[in-house]
Amino acid sequence: MIYTLTFNPALDYSVFLDELKVSEVNRTKDDYILAGGKGINVSIVLKNLGFDSTALGYIAGFTGDEIEREIVEKGVTCDFIKLEKGHSRINVKIKADQETEINGRGPVIEDKDIEALYQQLGKLQAGDLLILSGNVPASLPQTMYHDIMKSLQNKGIDFIVDATGESMLATLEYRPFMIKPNHHEIAELFDVEVKSNEDIIELAKKLQAKGARNVVVSMAGAGAILVGENGETAYSQTPKGTLVNSVGAGDSLVAGFVAGYLETKDLEKAFINGICTGSASAFSRDLATKEEVEALKKQLLEK
């Protein structure tokens, strides 16, 4: 079974403007609301690609109820912990001449809520896959991903970690199946300047030496790099298309990689599937569908 964990889900309110004028009244030309959060995005895209998962995490208040309603409507199984206080956050995504995001803080997660999560995770079994993605909220220990993996380390569970900085580095001793830093994040981790794909590959191998099994480094429109546990490396450009909405593209890459690997057990095929899935979301108002992904794969592989 696949599980995704989203500590701080949100309603993502995207508004479209020709130009954002500061200190003036701005009127949108279009807008829409989608349930979001990195793990939730992964679960939705996995469902679109034909794979079931269970979305775990915390929700609160009327916004939390709406998040759950939207996700269930899309066919995703949820097992959220409902907090007694506060409300799930609303993130405002401003799409104008430049993209601007205003992200809410979210509710406070108390010790009893943390214990409830550990009780949930304790039910996972050998062969399950747990996808940990997103920042750890301030009300939780910043070692939370490490602590979760430590608590499950002898159960035969595979982990995928899509986090940044120390939160990600601390998990490597538990040998996550895949991690997905971007090119800026991997440079910051080692406090170096990245000038070439070779530099990125070298840094990815350093993360492997620390415990990561497979490393996928995303580079936005410049493509992505895979450094696999089989010793192989691969680079792929992105398919051609028009950027509509970058929110969820990285999460979609993770979902596409997972779906591709479960389908083929081939790292390079999983990698290509991930790139095309991430691109399909970036080229759409909503998250990638299987039809969109297959069309982009055909385009990419015919080059």
Image: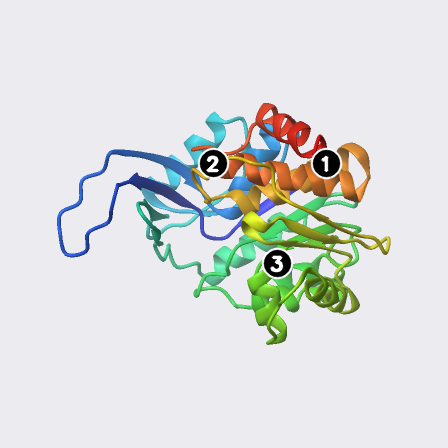
Residue 166 seen in render: no
State the residue at coordinates (56%, 36%): 240
The three-letter code of the residue at mark 3 reads Pro
Residue that mark 3 sits on: 181
Mark nearest the camera among 2 and 3 is 2
Mark 2 → mark 1, Cα distance in angstroms: 24 Å
Name the image quarter holding residue 152: bottom right
Q: Can residue 15 be seen?
A: yes
Whole-percent x, y for residue 76 in the image: 55, 31
Q: Earlier in the sequence, mark 2 or mark 1?
A: 2
Secondary structure, mark 1, is helix
Whether residue 110 is situated above or below residue 45 in the rendered picture = below
- Using the numbered discs, state the Cα–Cα distance from disc 2 to disc 3 in whole angstroms: 23 Å
Tag 1 and tag 3, C-beta contact below 8 Å: no
Percent x, y of residue 265 = 82, 38
Residue located beneath label 2 in the image: 242
Mark 2 is on which residue type? Thr
Q: Nearer the viewer, residue 55 or 283?
A: 283
Say whether marks 2 and 3 touch (CB < 8 Å): no
The mark closer to the camera, 2 or 1, is 2
Provide residue 250's location: percent of width, then percent of height.
Answer: 56, 47
Which residue matches tag 1? 260
In the rendered image, the residue lying farthest to the front is 303
In what quadrant of the picture does the C terminus appear? top right
